Image: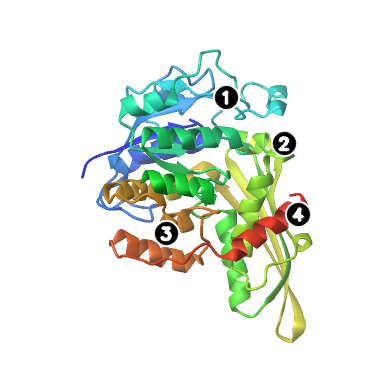
Amino acid sequence: MGKIKLAIAGLGNCASSLIQGIEYYKNSDDDNWIGLMHRSVGGYRPGDIEVVAAFDIDERKVGKDVSEAIFAPPNCTKTFYSNVPFMGVEVKKGPVLDGVAPHMASYDDSKTFVVSDREPCDVVRELDESGAEVLINYMPVGSEEASRFYAQAALDAGVGYVNCMPVFIASDPAWAKKFEEAGIPIVGDDVKSQIGATIVHRTLAKLFNDRGCKLDRTYQLNTGGNTDFLNMLSQDRLKSKRISKTEAVQSVLDVPLMADDIHIGPSDYVPWQKDNKICFLRMEGRIFGDVPINLELRLSVEDSPNSGGSTIDAIRVCKMAIDRKIGGPLLEISACTMKHPPVQYPDFVARELLERFLKGEALDLAPEPPLRLRLATAVEDKGD
């Protein structure tokens, strides 16, 4: 197989983990595939992903080689592969737009973004000249305008788009139609970590539902110390994030909870945690005889490598779709790796659909269920 030429918008912690992972698996023994859901996707292995373009706004990254930029402040994720080779790919400045929350200016430079004074590049031209085939969006949470800018850039340049952020693009019918009409694949929205707060909460909610336990109320509270958590201290940037995380849990229940009985979302910024994310989860319900049951769980995980296990598959499937000349939202991989896909499926169903897609089996997937729209409306009405 050939290479997958990847462009990255946002050289933060998630990009750092992804690139470290590409090199880690490229240089691992054939028997060492710990942490991957698939060794090969359509014949593509992790080492076949080649970064050819990158965009950021931070002066400590812009103008640097990607191999250097991924370790620059304010990145704070775990370094599990330090020997990332020089790539010969200069990080170009993208447009700032709404990528930097105003409140972040109050924090020390080591914790926040320092905007470069360079002029933004022509992103579409950079994508064209680099030969990029897939563009992955790692903009900060709340970057609605920036995420849509890069989505349009992907359309204009004719490259696949993997939207890891909670901005509804693949799951927005108008944007989905644009990608479908252009014959360009898109995966999204809002990456679902390998073993993260959302997938664990969703799995336990499905367990309650399937075992006849009435779930009465639940919360998921998350803390972390990376720029994402600092960025999310601004509540007006969290609307889409809360919808995305809440719907991922609600969608596995036969009867969704009322808005007052479910609270899911980032809770606080704890600087010394750095890229470590801690989830506090509580579920209250009733079992046989209407007897109460309470479940409490604490999950601690390095946040950015946790997302890499999903995005490395999303990128490869997006390239598969390009090879197969498939455009529009890729429902199977989106349902497996994203919190807010165009169609929500139970995780075991999504996994089976993806495996069939990888084998090239033609599938007649159901249209978007009305339930998704009802859930999103319910959360919006509550003002979350």
Q: Which residue is mark 2?
A: 234
Which numbered disc, 4 or 2, marks the residue closer to the eye?
4
Q: CA distance from mark 4 to mark 2?
A: 19 Å
Q: Nearer the viewer, mark 4 or mark 3?
A: 4
The residue to which callout 4 is attached is 381
Of residues 8 and 366, the one nearer the viewer is 366
* Disc 1 from disc 4: Cα separation: 30 Å
N-term mark: 2 or 1: 1
Tell me the quarter of the image containing the N terminus. Answer: top left
Which residue is label 3 attached to?
332
> SS at mark 3?
helix
Report if the CB atoms under discs 1 and 3 are less than 8 Å apart: no
- The picture places residue 203, in percent across and down from the top left corner, at 56, 65
**Label 1 SS:** loop
Label 2 sits on what residue type? Ser
Q: Helix, strand, or loop for circle 4?
A: helix
Q: Is residue 74 above or below residue 342?
A: above
**Pointer 4 or 2: first along the chain:** 2
Q: Quadrant of residue 37?
A: bottom left
Of the numbered discs 4 and 3, the one sitting upstream in the chain is 3
Q: Are marks 1 and 4 in contact (CB under 8 Å)?
A: no
Q: Nearer the viewer, mark 2 or mark 1?
A: 1
Q: Earlier in the sequence, mark 1 or mark 4?
A: 1
Residue appearing at x 55%, y 16% in the figure: 116
Mark yes or no: residue 65 visible.
yes
